[in-house]
Amino acid sequence: MTPQEIYESKKTTIQGALAHIKSGDRLVGAFYANEPATLYQHLHTIADRVDRVTVWTGNIKNQHPFLVDPSYRDTFELYSCFLGPVTRQAHAEERLSYVPFDLRALGPGVVEFGRPNVYLGGVAPMDEEGYLYLSPSLQWEYETFRAAETRIVEVNPRIPRVYGSTKIHVSEVTCLIETDCDIYELQDAPAGEVEK
């Protein structure tokens, strides 16, 4: 099969992708620009058919229902190694456990401690050789992608392609969805008197 044929055979709907998640699964989601925003926005829709799904997150851009709605507390067991605005609130409400890691040990540490079996992440579009890119974040993406048995990605043209060890072949993913949503972007703080 050509890379494009493999790509087409892996392509599915949001619900088709989420159908791969089962009770007891241990999910890990990518960080920053690789945040699986579309999958996260719909993750709560599987709450009626799964139980005790562990979700490891990092800095999250959006207020996804599975993370901010207390009614999902018994369905999704939440962990994060970073506390940003969204995860900080869930932590304050005792719905998310904060697990500190040394940044250098983050990928191997989450693989060892969290034992993820499902990877969710955004990727840059496929190149002509059939490679997708986990760029531009590699805080735990590469290690957790490799550790997971089920690898669900959302292809987003807004994610920039960064070359190097970020590439994965389309044949290595379980399934993919296509999306075109904004990616995580840090805004510059306004300049104060000192900076002016």
Image: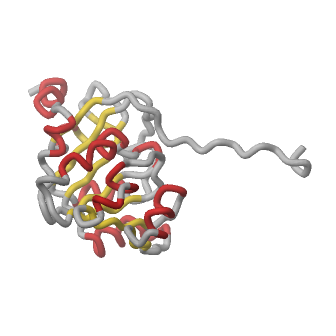
Q: Nearer the viewer, residue 96 or 173?
A: 96
**Residue 3 % position (x, y):** 18, 28
Q: Which corner quadrant holds the N terminus?
A: top left
Furthest residue to the front?
71
Q: Residue at x 49, y 70 (%)?
A: 92
Instruction: Please tell me which residue is depicted at 25% across the width and 57% down the height of the picture.
Output: 146
Horizontal arrangement in the rendering, residue 169 relative to residue 88 (left or right) = left
Tell me which residue sits at (29%, 37%) in the image: 154
Q: Nearer the viewer, residue 50 or 163?
A: 50
Above or below, comparing residue 90 to residue 3 in the picture: below
- Number of marks in picture: 0
Residue 9, by quadrant, is top left
Query: In the displayed structure, would residue 110 be above or below residue 170?
Result: below
* Quadrant in which residue 5 is drawn: top left
Relative to residue 158, is residue 85 depicted above or below? below
On screen, 133 above or below 111? above
Residue 100, how many percent across, how many down? 46, 74
Image quadrant assignment for residue 161: top left
Image-based side of 136 in relation to 50, left or right: right
User: Which residue is painted at 24% across and 69% down in the image?
Assistant: 115
Q: Horizontal and vertical percent for residue 122?
A: 35, 41
Depth order, front residue of 192/131: 192
